[in-house]
Amino acid sequence: MTNTNDLNITPDMTELQIAQKYSQHFGLPFVELKKLSLSKDLAKIIPKHIVGDFKIIPYEHILGDKELIKIAVADPRKLQQRAPEVIVDLKKKGVNIALAVTTKSDFEFAFDKIFNDVVDKKHDDKISEVSKPLEDRGQSISLNSDFSYIELVDKRIPYDILTKIPQDVAEKYMIIVFDAPIDQLKIKVAALRPDNNATKEILDFIKSRNHLEIELYKASKDGIEYALKLYQQKPSIQNPPSYADSKYESKSEPLNDIKPIASGPISSIPLAKPLPKISNQPNLPPLKLDNKPIIREEDQPKDDQLETVESKIAFDSVSEDEENNLDLLFPTGISNEKILENVITSGIIPKIVAAIIYYGVKSEASDIHLEPNESDFSLRFRIDGMLKNIVKMPIELHAPVISRIKIISKLKIDEQRIPQDGRFDVVAIKKEIDLRVSTFPTVHGEKIVMRILDKSGGIKKIEDLGFTGSNLEKINSNINKPHGIIMATGPTGSGKSTTLYAILNKINRPEVNIVTLEDPVEYDIPGVNQCQIKPKIGFSFAEGLRSILRQDPDVIMVGEIRDTETASMSTHAALTGHLVLTSLHTNDAAGALPRLVNMGVEPFLITSSINCIIAQRLVRKICPDCKAEYNPPEPVIKDIKDELANSKNDEVLMHVNEPLKFYKGKGCKSCTNGYKGRMGIYEVLLVSGEIENLAVHKEPASKILEKAVEEGMITMKQDGIIKAINGLTTLDEVLRVTSGD
């Protein structure tokens, strides 16, 4: 053992000089404990009597691939003959230890602060020294704060407790859950600014929605940032093993047979298994789910396992992988509404939201509607263009479900007064799904609609959309022209964007420069330069068009003509040698020309630039598994033949004099009321000389339609009837979508 003479320590040396001698002799760094924020939890992994006997105290724990526990020692000579068994045990378990020398007074200060709770009377003069470095780092921890201070640096926070508040929310509000007693409806939260209004609002929201008590503490910026990094850890680190038991009372062994405890990198500490979740909460009356108990009587948990929907709302989490890949979360799938109801009755909000999305994808829904009512919370899917009631949930689930969706959509969960738009991606049924989220305040609370876009499905070919015969020939001939406008028209949700994407995909070649302006960009097309407009910052379709023309484009797609400026610039681009694809909201093809004239575009420019106009609607297809022939009433057959006889196109007239057969679906397990999927019905108008003349003279749409039919255009209604005769859709569908035309 090294003695004092070997170190040349003299009686007149100060504590600092002695510590520096130890540091030089043993090759250890020097640390000033008074300037550090010490963690009681970390320090107490070594029992108090051992800390006092050996003058050692843990002061820093570094997480990572290699874990490191730093221990300050006031007299390193005590560790030469023997080391406390607690350290030996840590070393044997693969824990690396790094020593640092501190002064005797620093050790005593830390010992009193950790084990004797002495922070004011005895060390008043030292407190300011401890606080000053924190203030220098901009943390300004006030000793006179109304909130108790918690040191999060090096604090072990179990992963399942930390993630009770999602990472996005924790980062935004700088709040951390660091404790949640399993026998109480209470959590302990540390906040950087506990008296901040935004912090109070989010915590009040969490408190009211989850029916729990929140014990609020103040933490430093370093502490919050340290805890936020723990979200990246896998839940392999739980509370450190307690070494304050009888096996460490007096046992110790020399360090001669092991490596010096100050050397080598540190590995990990094997930690205890996660504590089981036990709930002693009262058994509240079961909530109702579509007139059924949320938890059936026979399913009620017993005794100490009692759990209720309220106690679990927003307090169970899923892993990041499960959140992004719903196939991992539901390996057996959500194949029917009964399974969905079972997930909803669990009350686990992340799983409820995931199950709703999964079942929406499984049902081939285009939109998911979540609508609060006075006494319940409705879930509806839009399938094949028609809304369908799925389930009515308890109103208690409304707020947490909406909040969960807003969190993963990167929306403000505390903003409920105005609409918001967001998006997020998931994988479900091995498909890459993009969800566009729209919130809307109603008298009963926020309503959410999620638009489902299947990115893995690819872009359909023109032939697969429902274009046939002369309509398909007209499209193919016009998309091969080097300039002009191809315009898709129809109401919202009629498939205009899908048509434009299919055309883009067909003309997408390496020798063609295609640039798009979209709102939003719905599908990513390799080889196409796609741009999202941002009206809020002044980047509109018109503004984007100005820039596109300097990008040497061959083909330009403008998502929608919304104003006169965009219409004028689109016609200008077409007249200067570019092929322009765009869309417009009109009921039929003939109505597009007068609409553009009314927008202020010169008629002669319109007719000179437009190649063809496509009007369309979507109809549901008959399910092939339950398709059956049926005979409509005779008056209906007569009306159908009269409609076909008005055509001048041979493709239509060939059906007038033949027996007509029609079909419908009976309804089966694989379909919805006899329908499965959708297809388009179309009319394609070519701007001929006579139609140009009518437009220039500002004739009404009815005159233009009459001339187009005379020239052989197949109307949407006629195209739909032909598809019904061919067994692709029903007469009811055709009449439903064309009855207003």
Image (cartoon, rainbow, N blue to C red):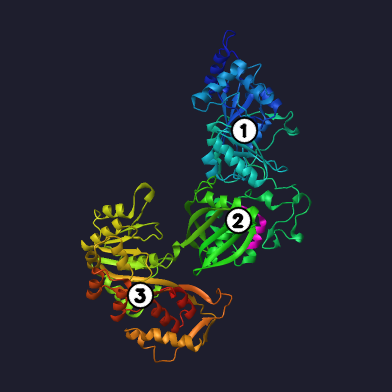
Looking at the image, do the residues carrying marks 2 and 1 touch, with CB atoms under 8 Å apart?
A: no
Residue extending furthest toward the left: 576
Q: Could you tell which of marks 2 and 1 lies nearer the N-terminus?
A: 1
Q: Which is more foreground, mark 1 or mark 3?
A: 3
Q: CA distance from mark 3 to mark 2?
A: 45 Å
Residue 381's x, y, as percent? 54, 64
Q: Would you say the magenta stretch is mainly helix, strand or loop?
A: helix
CA neighbours of label 2 inside 10 A, class few (<14), some (14 to 19), many (20+): many
Q: Which residues are magenta?
A: 340-349
Name the residue: 78% across, 54% down.
302
Q: Could you tell which of marks 1 and 3 lies nearer the N-terminus?
A: 1
In the rendered image, residue 78 lying in the magenta stretch gets the answer: no
Circle 1 sits on which residue? 217
CA neighbours of label 3 inside 10 A, class few (<14), some (14 to 19), many (20+): many
Front residue of 141/179: it is 141
Circle 2 sits on which residue? 351
Name the residue: 52% across, 47% down.
417
Amino acid at the residue labelled 3: Glu
Residue extending furthest toward the right: 303
Circle 3 sits on which residue? 683
Amino acid at the residue labelled 2: Lys
**Badge 1 element:** strand
Amino acid at the residue labelled 1: Tyr
